[in-house]
C-alpha cells in the first residue's frame, strides 16, 4: 500500500480524491496518465484512504467500476487495515460489494484488530444481511476471532434477537456453536439466551452446543435467560436437558435471578423443573426474600410454592410429577415434529396407535431421556387394557403421565370468566353513564420541522435596554442600531394560549403573520380567544377577533367564548362578543347558558344586559330551571332581588309534566324552592 509522503504525492493524491468526490472522470484519467506512477493506488497520509475506498464508502458504483478499470487494486488497505470491500460492507452497500467481489476482492482480509469483513456485517438491517450472504459465498471466515479474543459468532449472538438472520447464516456455514470469549468465558449460547432469541438457541443446541457450559463466574445459559425473563428460552434449554438448578460463584441459582427480575412465570417453571427454592446465596437470601425486597408479590407467591415443594422432596415426599416424566415431556415438546412424523410412518391405517416395540425403538433412536424401568411405567400408564399398543396422540398430550400444572398449557393466559348470579346467569355490573372523552390531536410537526401548532415562537424585543427603555424610546426606528452589536438570543417557544393569557400580543402578531391558525386548540379544546375571555383581557380579545377568531367554537365542556366572558364578570367583553355575533343562548355540556355563568359570578349588570339583549330565561340546565340556579348561586343579594322583580315575567315554574332523571324527592324540593322564591319576590 503506497502512502503519499512527498509534497507532490500528497497534492496529487488529494486532487485525485477530490475528483472522485466530484465524479470528474476526465480529470481522474488525466491525473493517472500524467501524474506519478500508480497514483490510483496511492492513499492519503491521514487515514490511508484511496480513491477506491472513497467511492466504495459513498456507494458510487460507476466510480468504483471506473477506478477498477484504471488499474486500482481491490485489496489495498487503509491505515486501519480495511479494504474497500470492508468499507462497503460496513455501510451495507450491496451493489458496490458485488462489484468488488467480481473484481477479485479478498474476503478473508482482516484489519489491524484481527477483525474480518463479517465483523462489519453484524448490524440489524436487511442490506447488511445481504452483504453477509455475499461475503460468505466468497469464502469469508465464519470462525474469525479478533485480536481481543472475541469470536465472530459470540459478537453476533449478543444481539441475536435483531441479528437472527446473520446468526443463522453463520451457523449454517460451520460456525462453531461452542465459541467462547476467552476473557469472560461467555459462550455464544449464553449470549443468544441473554438476548432472548429462541430460534438461534435451538439451532445452536441442534448443532452440538454444550447446554450446561458456564463462564468464569459459573453462569450458564439458564442463568442468562432467567436474568432477562426469557421463558421460551428456558423451555428450549429444558428440552435439551439443561441443569436448571445449578449455582454460580455467589451461589445464585436461575431462580434467584428470576425472582430479582420479577418474572413470575419463569420462577414457576424453574421451581417445577428441579431448581431448589430453599437454597441461600452468599448474602444469605432465599429467592422469596429477594422477591419480597423488590416488591414482586406474584413472584413471592411462586417462590413460596417452589420452596414448599423443595422441602417436601428433601423430607422424602413425592412430587406431583416424577423427574423422569418432566424431562421426557420437555424433550417431547422440542422433538414433537420428528416424533409425529415417525409415528405416522408406522401407522398406515391412521388408527393413532402403534405397538410397544415400535414405540420403544422410536424413543431410543431419537435419544429420549428415559431408561427401561421408566419406559415400563410410561407404557403401563398408556396401556390400561394391556393390548400391547399405545396411542401416540395421548403420549404427545402427556396428560396421563404429567400433572396438569406441569403442562405447558397451564402457562397460557386464559380469559377470565364473569361471576355468575342466580340460575347460572351472569351478574350485571353497575350502570355506567357514557361520558364523551375528548381527544386532542397528537401534534404533528409543522412545516420545515417546526414544533406542533399549539407552540409559537416567543417574540423577544431586540433592543439595548441600557440605551432605550419605556421612558427613553428611540426618536426614530433607525436610531435603534442594537441589532448590529447585540447577540441574537436562542429561539424559545410558548404555548399559543399562554401568550393570550399573558397578553403577549407581539408573539401573537408574529405567529399570525406567518400563517398560524388563530383557532388552534390545546388538549382541552380551548382556543386563545377563550383563554383571553376567561382572563378578562379586552385588548387581546379585540386583537383575536380582528384576526378572524371563531366566536362560535366550543371546548371540551361545550363552553363558548361568551361563557368564559360571563364567568370573568367583564361587561365590556360580553358587549364586544355580542357585537361580533356570539350565540347568547348557547348551552354547555350540562345545559348551562351564559346567563347562568353571569349569575354564578354575581354580576347583575351582565345579567341585566343579557336579558335586555333577549336571552332565553326559560332554558334549564340538568339541575333545574334558571330561577332556582339564580336563587342558590348568587341571587340572595339586594341587587338580584331588584333585578328579579323587574324581570319576573321572563321566568317560569318548572313544567310538572317534564320527566327528569333526578329522584322524586329532588324534584319536589326544587318546585318548593321555586315557589318560595317567587312568593318572596312578589312580597318585595
Image: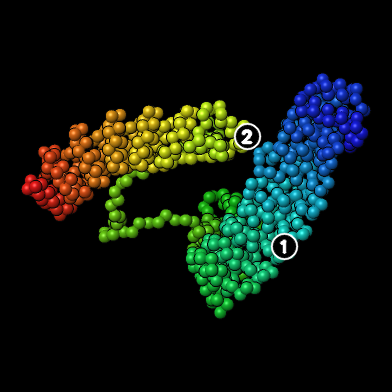
For residue 315, which quarter of the picture?
A: bottom right
Q: Nearer the viewer, residue 519 or 246?
A: 519
Quadrant where the N terminus is found in the figure:
top right
Percent x, y for residue 16? 83, 28
- Residue lying at 68% horizontally and 52% vertically, measured from the top left: 158
Give residue 485's mark: 2
User: Is residue 609 placed above or below 201 in the rendered structure?
Assistant: above
Q: Residue at x 36, y 38 (%)?
A: 537
Measure how far apart labels 1 and 2 are at the Cα level.
Answer: 65 Å
Q: Earlier in the sequence, mark 1 or mark 2?
A: 1
Q: Name the foreground residue: 241 vs 112.
A: 112
Tell me if mark 2 has few (under 14), some (14-19) or many (20+) residues whose alpha carbon lies within 10 angstroms of its own: few
Is any atom of residue 406 visible in this view?
no
Q: Is residue 555 left or right of residue 71?
A: left
SS at circle 1: loop
User: In the visual, does 119 lie left or right of 517?
Assistant: right
Across and down, in percent, residue 42 comes to 87, 33
Residue found at the far left of this picture: 683
Q: Residue visible at 26% across and 60% down?
A: 422
Q: How far across and how far down the image is residue 186, in percent?
A: 72, 59
Which of the 4 quarters of the picture holds residue 464? top right
Residue in the image at 90% along x and 25% along y? 35
Q: Which residue is disc 1 drawn over?
A: 215
Circle 2: element type: loop
- Graded by Cα atoms within 10 Å as few (under 14), some (14 to 19) or many (20 or more), the crowding at tag 1 reads some
* Rendering coords of residue 480 (x, y %): 56, 31
Colour theme: rainbow
Q: Can residue 73 be seen by looking at this rendering?
A: yes
Q: Is residue 461 left or right of residue 245?
A: left
Q: Which mark is residue 669?
A: none
Amino acid at each position: 500500500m503506497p502512502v503519499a509522503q512527498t509534497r507532490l504525492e500528497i497534492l496529487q493524491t488529494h486532487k485525485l480524491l477530490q475528483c472522485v468526490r466530484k465524479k470528474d472522470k476526465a480529470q481522474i484519467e488525466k491525473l493517472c496518465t500524467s501524474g506519478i506512477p500508480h497514483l490510483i493506488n496511492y492513499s492519503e497520509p491521514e487515514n490511508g484512504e484511496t480513491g477506491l475506498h472513497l467511492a466504495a464508502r459513498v456507494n458510487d458504483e460507476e466510480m468504483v467500476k471506473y477506478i477498477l478499470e484504471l488499474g486500482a487494486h481491490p485489496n489495498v488497505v487503509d491505515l486501519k487495515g480495511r479494504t474497500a470491500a470492508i468499507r462497503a460492507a460496513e455501510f451495507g452497500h450491496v451493489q458496490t460489494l458485488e462489484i468488488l467481489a467480481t473484481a477479485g476482492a479478498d474476503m478473508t482480509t482482516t484489519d489491524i484488530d484481527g477483525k474480518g469483513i463479517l465483523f462489519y456485517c453484524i448490524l440489524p438491517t436487511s442490506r447488511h444481511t445481504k452483504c453477509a450472504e455475499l461475503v460468505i459465498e466468497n469464502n469469508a471466515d465464519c470462525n474469525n476471532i479478533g485480536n481481543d479474543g472475541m469470536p465472530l459468532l459470540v459478537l453476533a449472538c449478543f444481539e441475536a434477537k435483531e441479528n437472527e438472520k446473520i446468526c443463522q447464516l453463520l451457523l449454517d456455514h460451520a460456525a462453531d456453536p461452542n465459541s467462547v470469549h476467552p476473557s469472560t468465558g461467555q459462550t455464544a449460547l449464553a449470549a443468544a439466551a441473554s438476548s432472548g432469541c429462541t430460534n438461534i438457541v435451538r439451532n445452536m443446541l441442534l448443532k452440538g452446543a454444550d447446554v450446561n457450559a458456564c463462564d468464569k463466574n459459573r453462569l450458564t445459559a439458564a442463568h442468562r435467560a432467567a436474568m432477562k425473563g426469557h421463558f421460551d428460552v428456558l423451555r428450549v434449554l429444558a428440552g435439551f436437558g439443561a441443569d436448571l438448578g445449578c449455582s454460580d460463584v455467589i451461589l445464585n441459582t436461575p431462580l434467584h435471578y428470576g425472582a430479582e427480575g420479577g418474572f413470575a412465570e419463569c420462577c414457576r417453571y424453574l421451581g417445577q423443573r428441579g431448581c431448589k427454592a430453599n437454597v441461600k446465596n452468599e448474602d444469605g437470601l432465599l429467592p422469596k426474600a429477594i422477591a419480597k425486597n423488590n416488591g414482586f408479590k406474584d413472584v413471592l407467591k411462586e417462590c413460596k410454592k417452589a420452596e414448599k415443594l423443595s422441602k417436601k422432596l428433601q423430607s422424602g415426599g413425592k412430587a406431583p410429577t416424577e423427574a423422569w416424566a418432566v424431562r421426557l415431556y420437555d424433550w417431547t415438546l422440542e422433538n414433537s415434529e420428528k416424533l409425529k412424523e415417525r409415528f405416522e410412518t408406522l401407522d398406515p391405517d391412521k388408527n393413532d396407535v402403534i405397538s410397544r416395540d415400535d414405540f420403544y425403538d422410536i424413543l431410543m433412536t431419537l435419544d429420549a431421556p428415559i431408561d427401561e424401568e421408566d419406559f415400563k411405567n410410561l407404557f403401563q400408564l398408556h396401556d390400561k387394557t394391556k393390548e400391547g399398543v399405545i396411542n401416540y396422540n395421548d403420549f404427545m398430550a402427556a396428560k396421563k403421565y404429567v400433572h396438569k400444572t406441569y403442562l405447558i398449557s397451564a402457562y397460557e393466559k386464559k380469559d377470565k370468566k364473569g361471576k355468575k348470579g342466580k340460575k347460572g346467569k351472569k351478574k350485571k355490573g353497575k350502570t355506567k353513564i357514557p361520558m364523551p372523552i375528548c381527544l386532542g390531536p397528537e401534534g404533528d410537526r409543522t412545516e420545515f420541522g417546526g414544533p406542533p401548532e399549539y407552540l409559537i415562537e416567543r417574540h423577544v424585543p431586540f433592543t439595548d435596554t441600557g440605551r432605550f427603555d419605556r421612558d427613553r424610546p428611540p426618536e426614530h426606528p433607525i436610531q435603534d442600531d442594537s441589532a448590529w452589536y447585540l447577540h441574537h438570543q436562542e429561539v424559545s417557544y410558548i404555548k399559543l394560549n399562554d401568550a393570550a393569557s399573558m397578553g403577549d400580543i407581539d408573539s401573537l402578531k408574529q405567529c399570525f403573520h406567518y400563517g398560524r391558525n388563530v383557532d388552534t386548540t390545546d388538549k382541552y379544546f380551548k382556543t386563545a380567544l377563550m383563554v383571553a375571555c376567561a382572563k378578562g383581557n379586552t385588548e387581546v380579545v379585540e386583537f383575536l377577533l380582528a384576526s378572524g377568531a371563531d366566536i362560535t367554537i366550543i371546548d371540551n365542556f361545550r363552553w363558548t367564548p361568551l361563557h368564559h366572558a360571563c364567568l370573568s364578570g367583564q361587561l365590556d367583553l360580553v358587549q364586544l362578543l355580542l357585537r361580533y355575533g356570539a350565540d347568547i343562548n348557547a348551552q354547555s355540556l350540562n345545559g348551562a347558558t351564559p346567563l347562568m355563568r353571569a349569575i354564578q359570578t354575581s354580576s347583575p349588570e351582565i345579567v341585566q344586559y343579557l336579558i335586555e339583549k333577549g336571552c332565553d330565561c326559560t332554558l334549564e340546565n340538568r339541575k333545574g330551571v334558571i330561577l332556582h340556579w339564580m336563587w342558590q348561586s348568587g341571587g340572595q343579594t339586594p341587587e338580584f332581588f331588584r333585578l328579579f322583580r323587574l324581570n319576573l315575567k321572563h321566568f317560569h315554574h318548572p313544567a310538572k309534566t317534564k320527566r327528569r332523571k333526578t329522584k322524586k324527592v329532588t324534584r319536589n324540593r326544587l318546585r318548593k324552592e321555586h315557589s318560595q322564591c317567587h312568593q318572596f319576590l312578589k312580597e318585595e
